[in-house]
Image (cartoon, rainbow, N blue to C red):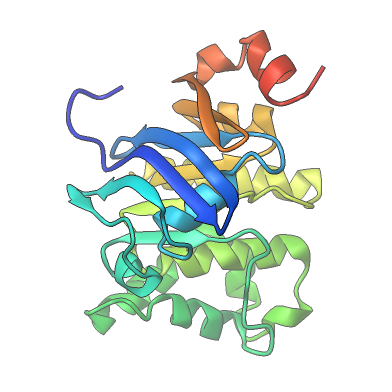
């Protein structure tokens, strides 16, 4: 990977819930401007890893270094102000609020409110469907539209690093394709992305580099194009024949 310090470096991350271990030992790097995929079957620890990075769950051990600062253990409101935003699995939208109100809530961490119109325009250009439905209640939208809104809300804080948790989960193939086209456009525009996915082919096509988790541990890593042809990824670590 890059010889310069990565934007995000996780070293020996551990997350415990009492006696249960959510993440046992995860290490990874995310260089600035890259798309890095976090792969693994259901229960491998992908969501817990992203939630720990974002400050939603406390870390038990290890370090989470973002832009040169160890942010492990800092609360979510502090982490997002540093330039790190999570689009969570399951969306967690304010369903009674309009699309635009949900997006505006994503801009809460911004110190300079004058940037909001430009950021709104950016989200609407990436996801034109949201522009068409800006006055619609979020709860009346389709699953694909809600996923777009969750990503758009995360983008409204203008993050240096965008965390995407299972963005293809439960969506129709055509919607997934359009979501990944949007991620490619964001990447081309310089957005750094850490993407957690169960869909191996999708993630490896989108990513520059990938890490495979198994039972809360990093067990394999490499350039995405190499892992795409690595039989261990499919057979051993992801349980796919």
Q: Say if 59 sits above or below 180 in the image.
A: below
Q: Say if 137 sits above or below 27 in the image.
A: below
- Inspect this view and state whether residue 202 appears: yes
Name which residue lies at 39% across and 33% down.
Answer: 28
Viewer-nearest residue: 196 or 216: 216
Viewer-nearest residue: 23 or 118: 23
> Seen in the image, is 165 located left or right of residue 141?
left
Quarter assignment of residue 177: top right
- Inspect this view and state whether residue 124 appears: no
x, y percentage for residue 193?
43, 45
User: Number of labelled discs?
Assistant: 0
Furthest-front residue in view?
Answer: 19
Name which residue lies at 56% across and 16% down.
Answer: 227
**Which quadrant holds the N terminus?**
top left
x, y percentage for residue 79?
32, 65
Name which residue lies at 50% across and 31% down.
Answer: 207
Viewer-nearest residue: 110 or 4: 4
Q: Say if 99 sits above or below 213 in the image.
A: below
Quarter assignment of residue 137: bottom right
Viewer-nearest residue: 92 or 205: 92
Name which residue lies at 48% across and 62% down.
Answer: 57
x, y percentage for residue 179?
62, 49
> Seen in the image, is 209 located left or right of residue 41?
left
> Seen in the image, is 236 located left or right of residue 213?
right
> Seen in the image, is 225 located left or right of residue 13?
right
**Which quadrant holds the C terminus?**
top right
x, y percentage for residue 117?
36, 78
């Amino acid at each position: 990977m890059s010889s310069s310090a990565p934007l995000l470096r996780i070293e020996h991350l551990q997350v415990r819930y009492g006696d249960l271990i959510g993440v046992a030992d995860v290490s990874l790097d995310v260089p600035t401007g890259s798309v890095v995929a976090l792969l693994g079957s259901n229960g491998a620890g992908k969501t817990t890893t992203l939630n720990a990075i974002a400050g939603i769950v406390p870390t038990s051990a290890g370090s989470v270094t973002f832009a040169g600062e160890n942010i492990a253990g800092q609360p979510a409101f502090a982490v997002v102000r540093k330039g790190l935003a999570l689009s969570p699995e399951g969306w967690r939208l304010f369903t009674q609020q309009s699309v635009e109100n949900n997006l505006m809530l994503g801009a809460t961490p911004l110190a300079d409110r004058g940037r909001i119109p430009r950021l709104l325009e950016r989200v609407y250009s990436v996801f034109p469907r949201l522009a068409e439905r800006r006055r619609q209640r979020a709860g009346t939208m389709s699953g694909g539209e809600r996923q777009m809104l969750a990503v758009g809300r995360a983008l409204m804080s203008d993050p240096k690093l965008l965390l995407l948790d299972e963005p293809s989960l439960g969506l129709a193939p055509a919607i997934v394709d359009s979501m990944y086209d949007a991620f490619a456009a964001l990447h081309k525009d310089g957005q750094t992305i850490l993407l957690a996915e169960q869909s191996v082919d999708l993630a490896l096509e989108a990513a520059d580099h990938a890490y495979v988790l198994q039972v809360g541990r990093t067990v394999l890593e490499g350039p995405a194009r190499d892992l795409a042809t690595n039989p261990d990824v499919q057979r051993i670590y992801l349980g796919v024949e």
